[in-house]
Amino acid sequence: MIQFSINKSYFLQALNATKRAISSKNAIPILSSLKIEVGSHSITLTGSNGQISIENTISANEADAGLLISSGGSILLEANFFINVISSLPEVSLDFEEIEQQQVLLKSGKSEITLKGKDVEQYPRLQEMTTSNPLVLETKLLKTLVAETAFAASTQESRPILTGVHLSLTDHKDFKAVATDSHRMSQRLLRLENATDNFDVVIPSRSLREFTAVFTDDIETVEVFFSSSQILFRSETISFYTRLLEGNYPDTDRLLVNQFETEVTFNTNNLRHSMERAHLISNATQNGTVKLEIVNQVVTAHVNSPEIGKVNEELDVEAISGSDLTISFNPTYLIDALKALRSETVTIRFISPVRPFTLTPGDDQENFIQLITPVRTN
Amino acid sequence: MIQFSINKSYFLQALNATKRAISSKNAIPILSSLKIEVGSHSITLTGSNGQISIENTISANEADAGLLISSGGSILLEANFFINVISSLPEVSLDFEEIEQQQVLLKSGKSEITLKGKDVEQYPRLQEMTTSNPLVLETKLLKTLVAETAFAASTQESRPILTGVHLSLTDHKDFKAVATDSHRMSQRLLRLENATDNFDVVIPSRSLREFTAVFTDDIETVEVFFSSSQILFRSETISFYTRLLEGNYPDTDRLLVNQFETEVTFNTNNLRHSMERAHLISNATQNGTVKLEIVNQVVTAHVNSPEIGKVNEELDVEAISGSDLTISFNPTYLIDALKALRSETVTIRFISPVRPFTLTPGDDQENFIQLITPVRTN
């Protein structure tokens, strides 16, 4: 029967990371549990919502953990409740002891709390994966890539494949991440130096956002393993599994054309604030659009709601070339796109009022491109 | 027709304070508006939800306001929307101009936003008050008093009078604030030196919490004016009106008896954390109580939930005297009471397992007293 003592803060940090995979309102009630497995030199915490699974390992070799294991075993505990109890304990360390079958006694200072648990046999078996030949990526790079693409995925279940981000590696070096909800698209290219087997997978964008929260900035690199149905991101202490989306991802390359009529470079933040003002009014209009007019090198934005009011604004421009143009679009797409850019300036290229326009960072025209579809207003 | 320019941040601060009286979901739709009245030397902003009304005056003499009035008038604007638009403007100052009847043009930098407003005649007339002979109180003192009592008022509308805080002045010097929801009570006494007429009013606790948010710590004193149906708190720039509750407040003095059998002094924070642990489990029990046992000068807390688990804890005690006792109560009441205390220690006095017990701050046994009713568990 389990018995160990551990540093409370260290334990809580691991518990909270694991909890990110656990939903208290799961269709499978047992998944609201946390699985605790105590071996002779480490503890493994497991949480899962059926889509994402997280395993967090606390090693007795890690000095900060203050982990002293007297006896091993395993148990399921209600995750939210257990974490609340642990965080309420008075002292810096706690004793965890299984006092009878599926019953745990927590001691800390003069406080003794007994909790009822469940048999680990009730917990579903997570799919195993062979872990050889990993793709090794910098955590920071991977998180940047998620921030640049995941927001553009669809939130509608009508075309499930579009709720994912399409990741592929071709020629053992050309890495591509792309997401689209059919109104906008965001694509990041990367050249990998020491890459492995080619792959072609679609990962739920929600899983990628959880990945970003779980892998903190102090984790330098992540190993990535692929199988036909899931993907595993692994650091020294954390294994993060997510199911893949099934189906063929649409061919997004055909949307990118290398021809344009008008090119404008803006200050990213100024343009974003202008669009936020426009959105306050466009939000109250029937089609929710802002109209951009480019006439004689001057760019103006216009929204008119007969009920609420209107916005007219001349936009600051860093550089401009090409033909005059009038185009309407939903400003929220442009706001989202600008939020994903880290460069000071952004170059927008227009073909015509009815063709998608592209955004590229002022400092990198090659590897990061976004696309927004306009709205026909008449 | 209105025309003025003003510093954006200063304007926003005043708008946000006024907005605290405005609910976007009011039964009277016009009350979602903000009233702007521009005189020759100042602007008055008014918001109201029918219970609370706030008038905020911005003077042209206030240097930070950067207020320059060209022409006066008045208009109603949708409050939330107007404030969002103002906060979105690009420059540090803005021009506000009424361009035609009930239509406002806002200019800031290259941005021009036109908003539709409404005729001020549609706005209800707020009740007038005669403002002579004020009671002058330190804002800080008044806010402390609210923090010490308002939480104990009822949130149930079954006895509306208990949703208020009872404020009274007797003998032109004895000030009392008391609130109770019939399970617990909190009472603060104050001796006022330069007080005015006696009063006896019941103010909705919700209004007092809004008062706390509106009167920031830089406002040193507040003038208080009374009428039969409302009360006015006034500083140099803000007038805060609230309706009073009608009816007789119950006689709470009879609840306070000066006799007890057991007296225990605790460290306030330690006791609070113990009760928070107890609450995690008591929350899952049928009667939601914690049991306190005092035996031979040792105080222990116990909760037992057959489904979830149990807590047993010895409580640290600073001083203890009197008979042994076992008493059960809802720990949330004790947690709330301890949160309202600013003293390092708290003295709790018990009479019997079925009689209310009192809490007083370790450093002030006279002027602040709280009372909690136990729960009979068998």
Image: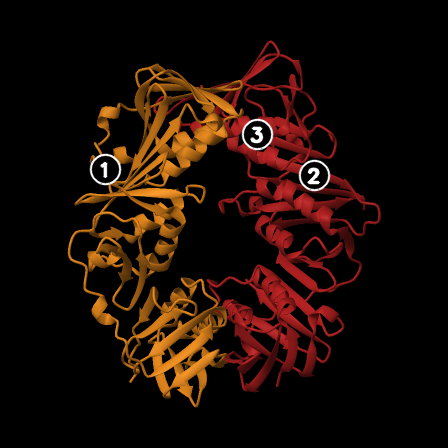
Chain colours: A red, B orange
The image quadrant where one finds the C terminus of chain B is bottom left
Residue A41 relative to residue A359: left or right: right
Q: Answer yes or no: do the residues labelled 2 and 1 have beta carbons within 8 Å?
A: no
Residue B29 relative to residue A53: left or right: left
Name the subunit of mark 2. Answer: A
User: Of the numbered discs in the image, which one, if any, rests on residue A188?
Assistant: 2
Q: For the residues carrying marks 2 and 1, which lies nearer the camera in this image?
A: 1
Q: Amino acid at mark 1?
A: Ser
Q: Answer yes or no: do the residues labelled 3 and 1 have beta carbons within 8 Å?
A: no
- The total number of labels drawn is 3
What residue is at 36 percent from the left and 83 percent from the top?
Answer: B262
The residue indicated by pointer 3 is A272
Residue B46 visible (yes or no): yes
- Residues packed near mark 1 inside 10 Å, few (<14), some (14 to 19) or many (20 plus): few
Extreme right residue here?
A: A194
Q: For the residues carrying marks 3 and 1, which lies nearer the camera in this image?
A: 1
Q: Amino acid at mark 3?
A: Arg
Helix or strand or loop: what does disc 1 sit on?
loop
What residue is at 18 percent from the left and 45 percent from the top?
Answer: B229
The residue indicated by pointer 1 is B132
Q: Amino acid at mark 2?
A: Arg
Q: List x then y, in percent, for residue B313.
A: 49, 81
Name the subunit of mark 3. Answer: A
Q: Earlier in the sequence, mark 2 or mark 3?
A: 2
Q: List x then y, in percent, for residue B300.
A: 45, 83
Extreme top residue here?
A: A296
Q: Is residue A214 above or below residue A370?
A: below
Q: Is residue B342 above or below residue A305?
A: below
Helix or strand or loop: what does disc 3 sit on?
helix
Residue A148 relative to residue B279: left or right: right
The image quadrant where one finds the N terminus of chain B is top left
Extreme front residue here?
A: B193
